[in-house]
Image: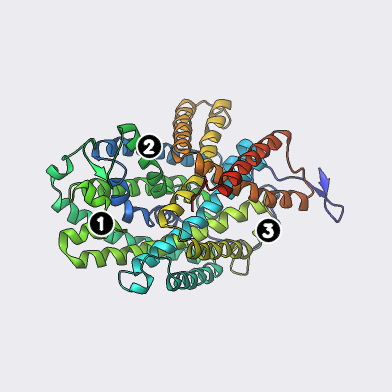
């Protein structure tokens, strides 16, 4: 126990954020319902990925390895969905999703790192969305072509601050707007699926099932294992957001709806992803699909029905990206607000305005988005570079969540009668192995860059602990920080010599 500047004792909040939590905003009498929570999950997952999925997958894997990869991804992500559902039910007092679970299971600094990595991943992903959004608008307005021109960056900046103003008016009103946008953006995807089902040709799909003779830009696809590994980061990108309802657990009207929304959202999005991806292989040769410009779904539909198809999908992608931007801005500010309430991030990030929106967290988030937008203008970073960086930063938060379920089941915590303990242990272990596989599939380059981001963020953690007069690091946490620092030094050295570059 330590003391604050007024001499009053300061005790650290336990894992349950309901214990001694300061009231920093206006009281709420209603919460988000099942529809709003499910829309947050679907809206977070359906952004840009599904519209670019055909070409990205065609450049990585033939139909055979693709099916194996989707099987691995489907089982792995389903286990993670079950993890979030189970934890929401067994630990309803733990708020904040990936952050809350990491903190409850592995301590304050690991909890902080989960929140920080998730937050950085989210706003880097928003930059990717903005770049692709204006690249898509280039179909109608050539001045935006490529998404990284001066006019495109100016347009993206204006849009960013319009969304900023919307969220400042309150998280609940923004979440309800997201429900409408989510419904609107699913329509063009369903239209594509219907047309693709009619145009599907089995002979095209089975022409080279295992990729033995297919070459992309003159290079072979590699072994079956190589193809499965190469498609992994793409599949993670399209599923990021599965934890959206868990992040919003404190704002849910009914805690049981958190788990339901996670599984419902996952099932719906998985079905759409499989249909879009597999049907596309029966419309054009794989090498031709891989050569399509993004959004490749537009090129495929244009091949089937003519030029109106490309325009229709482009409009759908614009709506989808707008919805994803809104959903992810909401998640960004929420993942900062909760740690700030629990002395893990600076208190200022929990400050809410009169509408209940975490204003300071919102300004910090969108300020970072603005800076990276300007960076893309100078360095011509591509959408794919941004996607891979955002994906790599969210892998460890997923791993900590699965690890927490394994920890609970192994200890028997919340399993007084033993019901479901073995099942939950197996689900957690499969989710943990899958998350570990994803870290491996991402490659060491992105791990080093992630470590650099974590080290920079550690300054916020130290700030938060000192302003609350609490112990900064435990002995075990010092070891973790040391490992992060060593990896960061290696990253800086490789960046300086030109041997490491992700943007």
- Which residue sits furthest front? 497
Residue 191 in view, yes or no? no
- Residue 229 is marked as 2
Image x and y of residue 136, in percent? 34, 65
Image x and y of residue 362, in percent? 58, 63
330 sits to left or right of 226: right
417 sits to left or right of 261: right
Q: Give the SS element for disc 1.
A: helix
Residue plotted at (77% across, 50% down): 466
Pick whichever of labels 2 and 1 is earlier in the sequence. Answer: 1
- Packing grade of label 2 (10 A; few <14, some 14-19, many >=20) is many
How far apart are labels 2 and 3 at the CA level?
47 Å
**Marks 2,3: beta carbons within 8 A:** no
* Front residue of this view, candidates 469 and 450: 450
- Residue 190 is marked as 1
Residue plotted at (35% across, 69% down): 137
- Residue 23 is marked as 3
Residue 302 in view, yes or no? yes
Image x and y of residue 11, in percent? 77, 45
- Residue 259 is marked as none
120 sits to left or right of 298: right
How far apart are labels 2 and 1 at the CA level?
28 Å
- Which residue sits furthest right? 7
Name the quadrant of the N terminus: top right
Residue 373 vertical placement versus 219 (above, below): below
Numbered disc in front, either 1 or 3: 1
* Front residue of this view, candidates 23 and 278: 278
* Front residue of this view, candidates 317 and 144: 144
Residue plotted at (28% across, 56% down): 296
Pick whichever of labels 2 and 3 is earlier in the sequence. Answer: 3
Pick whichever of labels 1 and 3 is earlier in the sequence. Answer: 3
């Amino acid at each position: 126990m330590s003391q604050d500047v007024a001499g009053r004792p300061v005790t650290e909040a336990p894992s349950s954020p309901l214990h001694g939590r300061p009231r920093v905003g206006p009281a709420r009498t209603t919460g988000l319902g099942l529809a709003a929570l499910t829309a947050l999950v679907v809206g977070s997952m359906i952004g840009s990925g599904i519209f670019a999925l055909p070409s990205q997958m065609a450049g990585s894997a033939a139909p055979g390895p693709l099916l194996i990869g989707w099987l691995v991804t489907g089982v792995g992500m389903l286990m993670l969905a079950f993890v979030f559902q189970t934890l929401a039910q067994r630990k309803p007092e733990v708020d904040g999703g990936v952050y809350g679970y990491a903190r409850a299971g592995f301590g304050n600094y690991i909890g902080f790192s989960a929140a920080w990595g998730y937050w950085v991943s989210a706003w880097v992903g928003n930059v990717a969305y903005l770049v692709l959004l204006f690249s898509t608008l280039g179909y109608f307005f050539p001045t935006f072509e490529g998404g990284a021109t001066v006019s495109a960056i100016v347009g993206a900046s204006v849009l960013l601050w319009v969304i900023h103003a919307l969220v400042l008016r309150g998280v609940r009103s923004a979440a309800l707007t997201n429900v409408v946008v989510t419904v609107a953006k699913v329509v063009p995807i369903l239209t594509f699926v219907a047309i693709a089902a009619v145009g599907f040709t089995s002979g095209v799909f089975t022409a080279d099932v295992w990729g033995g003779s297919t070459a992309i830009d003159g290079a072979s696809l590699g072994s079956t294992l190589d193809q499965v590994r190469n498609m992994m980061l793409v599949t993670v990108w399209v599923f990021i957001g599965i934890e959206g309802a868990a992040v919003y657990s404190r704002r849910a009207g009914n805690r049981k709806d958190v788990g339901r929304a996670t599984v419902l959202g996952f099932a719906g999005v998985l079905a759409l992803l499989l249909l879009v991806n597999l049907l596309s292989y029966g419309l054009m040769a794989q090498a031709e699909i891989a050569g399509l410009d993004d959004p490749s779904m537009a090129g495929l539909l244009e091949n089937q029905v003519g030029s109106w198809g490309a325009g229709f999908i482009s409009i759908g992608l614009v709506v989808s990206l707008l919805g994803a931007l809104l959903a992810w801005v909401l998640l960004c500010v929420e993942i900062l607000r909760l740690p700030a309430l629990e002395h893990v991030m600076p208190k200022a990030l929990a400050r809410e305005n009169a509408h209940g929106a975490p204003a300071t967290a919102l300004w910090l988030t969108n300020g970072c988005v603005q800076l990276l937008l300007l960076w893309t203008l100078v360095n011509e970073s591509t959408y794919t570079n941004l996607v891979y960086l955002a994906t790599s930063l969210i892998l460890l938060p997923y791993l900590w969540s699965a690890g927490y379920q394994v920890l609970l089941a192994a200890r028997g915590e919340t399993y007084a009668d033993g019901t479901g303990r073995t099942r939950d242990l197996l689900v957690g272990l499969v989710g943990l192995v899958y998350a570990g596989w994803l870290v491996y599939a991402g490659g060491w380059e992105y791990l080093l860059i992630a470590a650099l981001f974590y080290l920079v963020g550690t300054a916020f953690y130290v700030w938060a602990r000192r302003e609350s007069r609490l112990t900064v690091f435990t002995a075990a946490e010092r070891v973790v920080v040391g490992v992060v620092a060593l990896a960061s030094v290696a990253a800086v050295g490789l960046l300086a010599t030109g041997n490491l570059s992700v943007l």
